[in-house]
Image: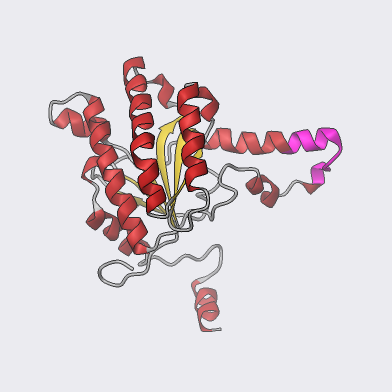
Amino acid sequence: MTADNTPVPQHIAIIMDGNGRWAKQRYQPRFMGHRAGVKTVEEIVKHCAELGVSVLSLFAFSSENWKRPSKEVSLLMELFALSLKQQSKRLHKNNIRLLIIGDVSKFPASLQKQITQAEQLTEKNTGLTINIAANYGGHWDIAHSVRALAEKVKSGELEPDDITEESISEGLSTSSLPEPDLFIRTGGEQRVSNFMLWQLAYTEFYFTDTLWPDFDSDKLDQAISSFFQRERRFGKTSEQIKEDENA
């Protein structure tokens, strides 16, 4: 529950945008914005755990981010590795599970090892699940699932007519998680940028001009309050929703 007793969505997905612009406004290198953004992650994770959110998905590094200047990408890799080293034991102590989704095979071997160790350390924790999307893209995720189904068809394990929406969902990197209830993007842009394209089909969107390093617990509560002012119909009419609630 939030401070005003508002219930919380069970899965919140966030694109953490605006780190570079935050640094530029302060005449600092872009990397300083990313460092400030890590502190915001710590605050939002803590708040979600306190509220009782089940899953927090964070878009940390997209498959398109490799196009950024090589120095910035290198610094981001170093920051990712440092954050894993510093935070994994703390997450474990607080009963938080860590998942990393995306094509991690593109990362340095040392970082891949850190990812595996952090996931194994926290895999049995039962509190908040932090789902970090790193070298992730929604197109990649869907293609990966469909490719696995195609292999089953090729081997005779599956008939083409047996491929369903459910079977595609089961092959996604988020198959063990509920689909997001609330999607938040900071930084003023209003697009999903290839993040969880399949999973966001019925998610409620919330866009804010606030740059990610300035996004705090109070602003998360505002987003959650906005979420609960909406009627989620999933294709039904308002009348049907009311009938279901009164049944």
Quadrant of the rendering where the N terminus is positioned: bottom left
Residue 198 drawn at (x, y percent): 56, 45
Residue 179 drawn at (x, y percent): 52, 54
| Camera sees residue 196 | no
Q: Is 216 placed left or right of 112 in the picture?
A: left
Q: Is residue 93 above or below residue 18?
A: below
Nearer to us in this view, 184 or 178:
178
Q: Which residues are magenta?
A: 149-161
Residue 225 drawn at (x, y percent): 31, 64
Q: Residue at x 23, y 57 (%)?
A: 218
Magenta stretch encompasses residue 153: yes
Q: Is residue 198 above or below residue 68?
A: below
Q: Is residue 122 above or below residue 18?
A: below
Q: Residue at x 25, y 30 (%)?
A: 20
Q: Residue at the right extreme?
A: 156
Nearer to us in this view, 144 or 210:
144
| Camera sees residue 178 | yes
Q: Residue at x 56, y 34 (%)?
A: 139
Quadrant of the rendering where the C terminus is positioned: bottom right
Q: Is 47 placed left or right of 110 in the picture?
A: left
